[in-house]
Amino acid sequence: MLKIDQVVSREVLDSRGYPTVEVELISGSIRASAIVPSGASTGEGEALELRDGDAKRYLGKGVLKAIAHVDREIAPAIVGREFHNQAIFDDLLRDLDGTPNKSKLGANSILPVSMAFARLHALNLDSSRIHPLALTEHLAGLFGSRGVTLPVPLMNVFNGGKHADNGIAIQEFMIIPVGFDRFSEALRAGVEVFHSLKKILHKRGLTTAVGDEGGFAPKLGVEAEAGPGSHEKVLTLLLDAIETAGYRAGSQIALALDCASSEFSKKDGNGCVYQFEGSPRTSADMVQLYEKWVSQYPILSIEDGLAEHDWEGWKLLTTRLGSRIQLVGDDLFVTNPEYLKKGIERGVANSLLVKLNQIGTVTETLEAMRMAHHSNYTTVISHRSGESEDSFIADLAVASDAGQIKTGSASRTDRLAKYNQLIRLEQALGTRAKFRGRETFKSW
Ligand code: PGA
Ligand code: ZN
């Protein structure tokens, strides 16, 4: 039993300099806090992120209303009460809100309370109160997993789409260091490739400033910017960087994309039309292009290759590529068991992207992951483009044995906070630590 004595909330800042919510829960002599992240390329089905809309503060992006909900709606309902477990606690939060998409209180008021409760409970159960694995072990207990698998990092070293202003439609170009025995070795290889990419860009006179997730975001030249072949230029750049760093592309370091294609598509009748490299494309055109790339480049995973409303297109994509690569649903599933169920029934995608704030509580996040694993869908734990120093997702990745994490490039402390936490967890697990590397993608 865990009794909540006090709730403290505050408006803090995320990695883009926009306000977000931090909540602290206090029980006796222990306290635990959590900060909620924020997306830019959000799926329409996501739980609501409540913003003040007061143009005089933070360009309308203040979160004082969400803070007020924590203080006036949530705190009175939980302070002085004892809770047996996370599910009971999260059920109460859901009941307080009472809407399907957390639109009354806002997911940004509910989730930090839910995450802070998980931390508080973990500390309460850990008699030392400071063990580095406390949260990981606690979440593993909730999920029913071993909680020993360090995730393969999908490192977003080249940013486009809504996370940059370089005209590149695809949002994320990632490297996946799969050919290594340990997480820390895989991470080192990924980081070295990041530095080698920087040198290559610099030599070619391209800017090495970084985008929201810490990857490079150069304009590739006026005529290439939005035109034919610009995306393949990026893929070739990544191969160059891998080889220049002394690694083998494919066997040691593979590639992944998050197209976030809802952002460059429009509804068209029952389907969608995609504005890509200067011309309109059908879903079938996009699928054909991805098939070509998968044959030419060591691509192991494509996220949101088609738009969130394009279920017919997604079916085609899965039929054509689902046995060859991982197809991850982000905007498509929004970490929501209902959407995921529809995908499983229709044979759409084969992997779930996991973002806590898309659904709004720890319990529902674990429920979506459980459903995915039962149906042999892989799971990729993910940050948001607006992040903070909170490294909860690193613990969640190890705890759930998900095997994959997407938490940006090798720059910006908001991204490295997660990698550093994974390094700590690997050390704390010692000989129990597992790293599955390429085995993670064994279905393909
Ligand atoms: P977002 O981007 O946090 O801006 O939604 C991340 C992603 O699309 O995976
Ligand atoms: Zn995505």
Image: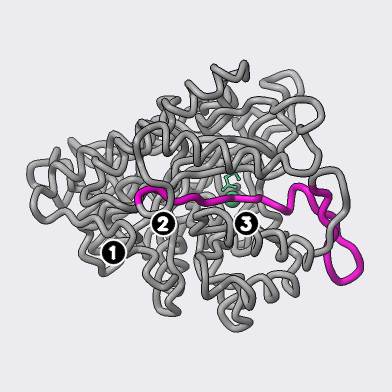
Q: Is residue 311 above or below residue 19?
A: below
Look at discs 1 and 3 and give the one toward the viewer: 3
Is 268 inside the magenta-drawn segment?
yes
Residue 142, numbered circle: 1
Label 1 sits on a secondary structure element that is: helix
| Residue under label 2 | 362
SS label for mark 3:
helix
- The amino acid type, in three-letter code, at marker 2 is Val
Magenta segment boundaries in residue numbering: 252-276
Left or right relative to 237: residue 269: right
Residue 235: percent from the left, percent from the top? 58, 43
Label 3 crowding class (10 Å Cα cut-off): few <14, some 14-19, many 20+? Answer: some
Which mark is drawn over residue 125? none
Residue 158 position within the rendered picture, expressed as x and y whole percent measured from the top left: 56, 35
Residue underneath mark 3: 293
Measure how far apart labels 3 and 2 are at the Cα level.
36 Å
Q: CA distance from mark 2 to mark 1?
A: 10 Å
Camera-side mark, 3 or 2: 3
Give the amino acid at mark 1: Leu
Secondary element type, mark 2: helix
Tell me if 157 is positioned left or right of 184 in this view: right
CB of mark 2 within 8 Å of CB of mark 1? yes
Whole-percent x, y for residue 160 in the image: 65, 36
Quarter of the picture holding the C terminus:
bottom left
Residue at 31% across, 39% down: 187
